[in-house]
Image (cartoon, rainbow, N blue to C red):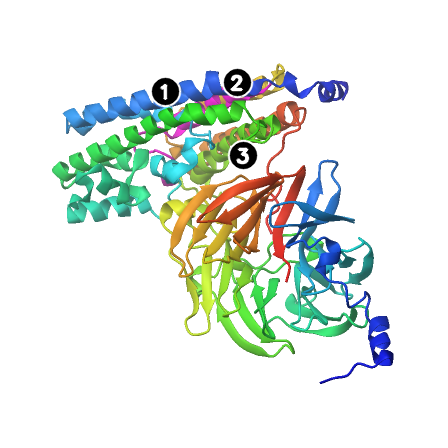
Amino acid sequence: MLRALLLCLLPATAFAGVDEVIDQHILPGYDRFAAETNALADAAASTCDMAALAPAYGAAFDAWMGISHIQFGPIEEDGRVVAIAFWPDPKNRVGKALSRLIADADPIIDTAEGFAEVSAAAHGLFALERLLFDPQDNPDYACALTRAAARALADSADEMVAEWPAFADQMRTAGAPGNMRFLSNQEVLGAIYTSLMTGLEFTKDQRLGRPLGTFDRPRPTMAEARRSGRSLRNVVLSLEATRDLAFALSAQPAPDTALAYDQALEMANALEDPTFEGVADVSGRFRVEVLQHQVQTVVSVISDEIGLPMGLSAGFNALDGD
Amino acid sequence: MIVTTRRTFLASVLASASLPSLTWAAAGSPSHLTAARDASGDYALYGLTEDGAIRFRVPLPDRGHAAAAHPTAPEAVAFARRPGRFALVIDCADGTVLHRLDSPDGMHFYGHGVFSLDGQTLFTTENHIATGEGRIGIWDRAAGYKRLGDFPSHGIGPHEIARIPGQEVLVVANGGILTNPDEGRDKLNLETMQPNLALLDENGTLQTLAEVPRDIHQNSLRHIAVAPDGLVACALQWQGDVFDSPPLMALYRADTGLQFVDMPDDILRQMSGYAGSVALLNAGEGIALTSPVGGTLTLFDRDGQVQTQTRHADICGVGRASFGGLATDGAGRVFRIADGAATPIARHGLSFDNHLIPIG
């Protein structure tokens, strides 16, 4: 209680988290994503051996996990976020969009302009995963589609890297005359905080919640990126990425947050169930549920230890639901 | 020609709560009404102008939801957030509470209401708790907002009610979701819910009932905007998997019925299965649909073709304005919608609530 009161008395300038978040977390994360997606696009351009592309694909996905929770900035434009990661996909829109293109051997993918017109479901990491890890009836077309999707992904990453400095300036100059995007530093912190919490909720409800399904109906085939065996890896990487962001955001040491993350990561690393197939049996399910519960604990601890002292909470209308 | 004698004129003045000569100019000529929470956590009803300035502020005892603006007199009815039991009739010229409307025993308000064409009757969406039947409450303004009775809304969970401008036709969005205040906002009938749009005359006689198709019956039709030509734009909230939501906007026309618009995958996924408010814009600007959950404003043309989608965290309130429309967000921003784009034009230290109500 005393600590909370003292924090309230600190001037707003004590919360210098914005520069740290931009310079230590966001910009390096986007640079890495652009480098890895370009490496994947270059590799795809040089070979149609899908197995040979798996390491570059994994590195690109790893890089995406470092920034996938950042929901503001150039990612908000042109539906980019959906075109990068079309998941969850309960009605198999990715599979259907790819099947349509492949069945017609549609030449629309031959140009970047044409591919841009194709459904977002046939773009990005999840379309590429199908192309790389599922058997293909028409390998030539699948190779061309892989090249188009990898190139478009890298182009999108390059565009965002190019656009980020201008957006970062808007974040840093919140409240300055003419800055209509961010009218106060608190609003910038709010956007960062919302991304942090939404990212954690996504891991809890989607990455863990989807395969868990219900007790009577577990859904292991709904696990994220199970074809490439990345389901658990994505949970670990998302926890690490949001931890990185939480520490960059918080102006104060956050020992409770650190401990909650340590416990969550320890549980995740001990699971040894890369695609959550274990949710189909009682003991395997229990261990994933315990992990899910611990992610909720991380959310609660961050809310108390970082959000509350900084005067941050989630959206007013977004949570009303009426 | 009706000649008003001095005696009948005085009688009419005495019978009405405020002077008949007072117009919205007496309240600073606001163009829109909205509820909001301020930095100290207090709730109030605000009058906004088209340039985003605040013209008046009247305190509310609790969180508001929507309001009904009298067509001519500077009088607003502010509704409590669902499931509310009261509404306040506010004189926006001097900030006084003229009347308090309490929902009858066994009923509660859903948070929206609208005035009749002549401005003498207020209609409110209500739940008959014991049966779960949607009702429309009738209140007589000239008699100090005396309760006159109620008629069926022709569905469960009537939420927004509007009137076709210039006509005595009410349009009711029956969201279809059964709730009971004893169980908070828990949704009790998701497996069987059947939302609809009901058009009624001001006596409550049903003219048309347009149902949401059976295969997407979990798409709750909750908010509407109505144009003078009878076009109704509907904003929906999907109760199923948010990553598998059907289109969240439908258009109703008398000749074509209720038609869902086509929303591409990327546009739809950004809305997280939730449309919070909708406006039919002026000046040829089409339709605006907000999603506070997805943090998006999507602009359509009048035929429902997507024009643009932009991201604005916690945006929700939206209403027509002379140049197109205005929108508000939970961070106190007011946006001008014109020329196919939304531009922030003002910022207040407030969290604007879900709805922005055009006056007149």
Q: Main secondary structure of the magenta part?
A: helix
- The percent coordinates of residue A250 (x first, y second) are 59, 19
Question: What is the C-alpha distance between the residues marked 1 and 2?
Answer: 17 Å
- Please, what is the three-letter code of the amino acid marked with disc 2? Asp
Relative height, residue B72 to residue B246 (above, below): below
Q: Residue at x 65, y 45 (%)?
A: B53
The answer to whether marks 3 and 2 sit on the same chain is yes
Task: Look at the numbered discs 3 and 2 and tell me whether their residues touch, using CB distance below 8 Å.
Answer: no
Q: In whole angstroms, how far apart are the C-alphas of marks 3 and 2?
A: 19 Å
Which residue corresponds to mark 1? A31
- Which of these two is toward me, A205 or A143? A143
Q: Earlier in the sequence, mark 3 or mark 1?
A: 1
Q: Nearer the viewer, residue A202 or B161?
A: B161
Q: Which residues are magenta?
A: A221-250
Q: Residue shown at 48%/20% (left/top)?
A: A22
B114 lies left or right of A160: right
Answer whether residue A123 is visible to the viewer in this image: yes
Q: Mark 3 = which residue?
A: A180
Answer with left or right where residue B302 lies relative to residue A48: right
Quick one: SS at disc 1? Answer: helix
Q: Earlier in the sequence, mark 3 or mark 2?
A: 2
Mark 2 chain: A
Q: Amino acid at mark 3?
A: Met
Of circles 1 and 2, the one toward us is 2
Judging by the rendered image, the residue that carries numbered circle 2 is A19
Q: CA distance from mark 3 to mark 1?
A: 27 Å
